[in-house]
Image (tube, rainbow, N blue to C red):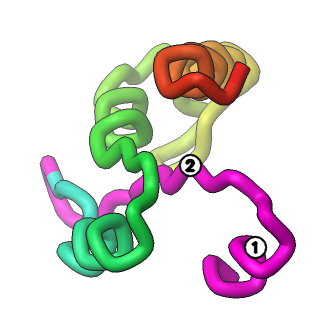
Amino acid sequence: MIELAKTQCVQLLLIGVPQKQLFSDVAPFYKELTEEHKLVFDGKLISSLLRTRSYKSDMVHFNKTGYQKMAEEIYQLLIDNGAL
C-alpha cells in the first residue's frame, strides 16, 4: 500500500497499532517501514489512548470520545509535519 500511495504522489503518515499485549508497543516492522520509505511515523498515539479507560467502549475499541481525541491528535501531527 505504501508503494502504491507513493506512485500516486500521496503523502503518508504511518500510525502504529500496538500488539495485543499488556502495555504493548507497536511491532518493530513499523520502524523498518518508516526508515525504508522515509515516512512520518507515530508509534505512541493509539497505545496511549488505549491506556485511558474513558476513551474506550471495550478492551480494544475506542468510543466516540476516543475517536475524537485520536482525530485531534492526527490533525496536530499533520500540522506539525507541514501537511496542513
Quadrant in which the C terminus appears: top right
Which residue is tagged 2? 13
Q: Earlier in the sequence, mark 2 or mark 1?
A: 1
User: For the point 70% across and 17% down, which residue is it?
Assistant: 68
Q: Position of residue 32 (x, y in %)?
A: 25, 77
Kindly state the secondary structure of the residue where label 1 is placed: helix
Mark carried by residue 38: none
Residue 38 placement: quadrant: bottom left
Q: Position of residue 70 (x, y in %)?
A: 59, 26
Quadrant in which the N terminus appears: bottom right
Q: Which region shows up in magenta? A: 1-23
Kindly state the secondary structure of the residue where label 2 is placed: strand
Compared to residue 10, the image places residue 64 above or below, namely above
Q: Position of residue 46 (x, y in %)?
A: 42, 40
Q: Identify residue type, mark 2.
A: Leu
User: For the point 50% across and 55% down, which residue is it?
Assistant: 14
Which residue is tagged 1? 5
Q: Is residue 78 left or right of residue 17?
A: right
Compared to residue 35, the image places residue 25 above or below, namely above
Q: Is residue 57 left or right of residue 68?
A: left
Residue 19 placement: quadrant: bottom left
Principal SS element in the magenta part? Answer: loop
How would you rate the neighbour count of disc 1 (Cα within 10 Å): few for under 14, some for 14-19, many for 20 or more?
few
Cα distance between the residues tagged 2 and 1:
11 Å
Report if residue 55 is visible in the image: no
How would you rate the neighbour count of disc 2 (Cα within 10 Å): few for under 14, some for 14-19, many for 20 or more?
some
Q: Is residue 62 left or right of residue 23?
A: right
Q: Position of residue 35 (x, y in %)?
A: 27, 69
Compared to residue 6, the image places residue 54 above or below, namely above
Residue situated in front as seen by the camera: 27 or 65: 27
Q: Identify residue type, mark 1.
A: Ala
